[in-house]
Amino acid sequence: MKTSYIWNLSEGRAFPVELWKHSKIKIQVNQMDLSEIDRIAISPNDIHILFLQVTLLEWNKIQQTIATSFEGSPFVSLILISSPDGADQIQAAVQSQPKYLVLENPLHVRELRMILDRTIQSESYKAAALDIGNSCLENVGFFEGVFSLAHQEYEESKKENEALRSILQYEELVKRSQAGISTALEKVNDMKNQELIELHERVKASQKLDELREKELKQALELQKATEQVLNYSRIEEMNLDKILRAQDRLFEYTEQEIKELVEENKSLKKKLGLI
């Protein structure tokens, strides 16, 4: 089990956070005076966090030592600084270095606990990932075989995917063809329906034409009948006129005969009277 060392550097100030248990990491607080900074031993396989409780004057005395011994160390995860009188000045001095974190004054214990816990968790995960990486390097031959097998399976899967893609493309072409056939059938049905409609219209037009022709025929027959009646009436009138003319002729003939007889009778009478 890894150990997380919290180095509490101060002039007799106690560590403000109560220790807590972690399921996978042992947490240990080491109390050190500022004069004992050189005694801090940084082990490469553990987690190290420096917690400085200093005044501005104390910080100015140890700043160079902290920068030289711990600022560039890859095994020091975080340098926390709490100062009752110099937080702003210290922040201005270390703000370009990501390993420092200057806490607000007054110190919030709960916030400090959360920062420590998250830092320990993060370093634990990083260490676990590093262990896994080292284990993989130690078993590189095994993993090469696994990767080779995985690559072979990938190639086979790729071929299967290509075959499946071809099948899907064929199905897509079939679907498109079926869709085209359906569209063509719909167009044919539409054309048939249109032809039926046009045929129905032509039949209706033909029926109307027949009705008109029948009506015209009836009118022609009625006209012919009326004409015949007129002609018959004209012939009757002509016959009646002929009869009248013949009667007049007979009348004239009869009158002329009577006139002749009267003339002859008049002559005879004159003879008898001796007038002639």
Image (tube, helix red, strand yellow):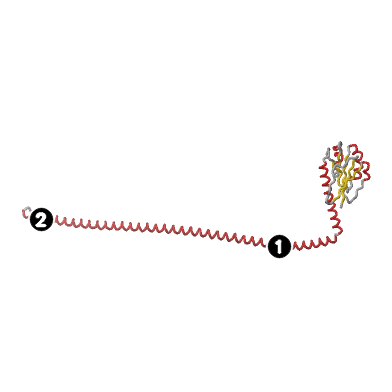
Q: Secondary structure at mark 1?
A: helix
Q: Earlier in the sequence, mark 2 or mark 1?
A: 1
Element marked by disc 2: helix
Q: Return the residue at label 1.
A: 164
Q: Residue 39 lies in what quarter of the image? A: top right
Foreground of the two, 112 or 186: 112
Residue at x 66%, y 62% (from the top left corner): 171
How packed mark 2 is, by other alpha carbons closer than 10 Å (few <14, some 14-19, many 20 or more), is few
Q: Position of residue 99 (x, y in %)?
A: 86, 44
Q: Is residue 44 left or right of residue 149?
A: right
Amino acid, disc 2: Glu
Q: Amino acid at mark 1?
A: Leu
Disc 2 and disc 1: Cα gap in Å?
A: 147 Å
Query: In x, y percent, where is residue 159?
Result: 74, 63
Closer-to-camera residue (79/272):
79
Mark 1 is surrounded, within 10 Å at the Cα level, by few (under 14), some (14 to 19) or many (20 or more) other residues, namely few
From the viewer's perspective, tell me whether residue 251 is left or right of residue 231. left
Residue nearest the observer in this picture, 14 or 197: 14
**Res 149 quadrant in image:** bottom right
**Residue 196 coordinates in the image, percent (x, y):** 51, 60
Relative height, residue 44 to residue 160 (above, below): above
Q: Residue furthest top?
A: 85
Residue at 55% across / 60% down in the picture? 189
Q: Residue 222 at what x, y percent from top left?
A: 35, 57
- Please indicate whether residue 219 sits to the left or right of residue 6 in the image: left
Q: Which residue is mark 2?
A: 265
In front of the other: label 2 or label 1? Answer: 1
Label for residue 150?
none
